[in-house]
Amino acid sequence: MAAVRLLGICKRFADREVLCDVHLEVAPGEFFALLGPSGCGKTTLLRLIAGLEQPDAGRIWLDGQDVTAWPPERRQVGFVFQDYALFPHLNVLDNVAFGLAARGMKKAERYARARHMLVRLGLEGEARKPVSALSGGQQQRVALARALVLEPRLLLLDEPLSNLDEALREQARIELKRLQRENALTVLYVTHDQQEALALADRVGILWEGRLEQVGTPLEVYHRPATAVVARFLGANVLPLTPRTREWGIGEEPGFQWAVRPEDWEVAPDPEGWPVVSRQFFGLYTELFVQVEAVLLRVWVPSDFPESPTVRLRPRRLVRVRLREGATLL
């Protein structure tokens, strides 16, 4: 039985269609990431599952129950918002205990459960502090503690790491995945960050302009994109013509499209080649954009500074572009 089942979900705001015929199943204990650009409908889908919005069409099932018409408080869903939505006038302990109080739990029991959750998340020393005195990473853990203390059957996370710096994000990813596994939580995680989705999720759904383009494991969506939209969003080059040889060439099947990952190209200086338009250093690799006919080709090459000839591939230099041995056309 699916933990979450969405059947033909549609949602409009005024004259704008935000979600269109979304079908999705999430298994119990699965970490599912919903990945897409800003404005594609990700947060709206979470709000529909939580009961904060109502669909214009379609049904929502949780653990085999049709909850489409249920109010939020009946759904037993935890929701961590992008801005955490903590109560600034309450201290950390009271923030975590708040939902238990709303359920009518007695004071001694709710505070005992809240303190236990703070211990599990390494926040026991912060219980009496105002949330405004905490770092971004600590606030994120308080928001998680407030959701987890309610023992939800489903945890919805709306870009919960977007306000953290890179070092804290990496640490928070590890902690979040640990909590999910230890508690066998079903998690639906919304993000526009591709690395985050691919690193955390058991499966990924690509949402684009309100439509679910593809669902699969991180390896499947990365190496076997189902549509040109998915390939482009995940950084692949979608070519309007097929290469004739392993060198770049004019294909013989106009209109046919191939997708090639940026790491599957090799480049070398060539006075009769194509111009480098831009170059960015990202540590382990350097990203080049090469103007090949009408296509702006994205290429990733190892950054073996200072020995690599990549160092000399500055903008306006001419290069030869070639598919590396064993490269796969998607």
Image: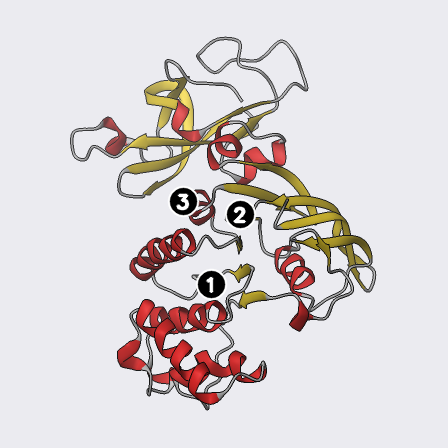
Per the model, the C-alpha gap separating discs 1 and 2 is: 14 Å
Q: Earlier in the sequence, mark 1 or mark 2?
A: 2
Mark 3 is on which residue type?
Ala
The answer to whether residue 121 of the structure is visible from this angle is: no
Q: Quadrant of residue 272?
A: top left
Mark 1 is on which residue type?
Pro
The front one of 252 and 85 is 85
Q: SS at mark 2?
A: strand
Q: Quadrant of residue 127?
A: bottom left
Residue at image point 49% right, 33% down: 222
Q: Is residue 59 left or right of residue 319?
A: right
Q: Dot 3 corresponds to which residue?
A: 199
Please give the label number shown on residue 160: 1
Mark 2 is on which residue type?
Phe
Per the model, the C-alpha gap separating discs 1 and 3 is: 15 Å
Residue at image point 24% right, 34% down: 311
Categorize mark 3 by other alpha carbons within 10 Å: few (<14), some (14-19), many (20+): few
Question: Which quarter of the rendering shows the C terminus?
Answer: top right
Please give the label number shown on residue 32: 2
Per the model, the C-alpha gap separating discs 2 and 3 is: 11 Å
Between disc 1 and disc 2, the foreground one is 2
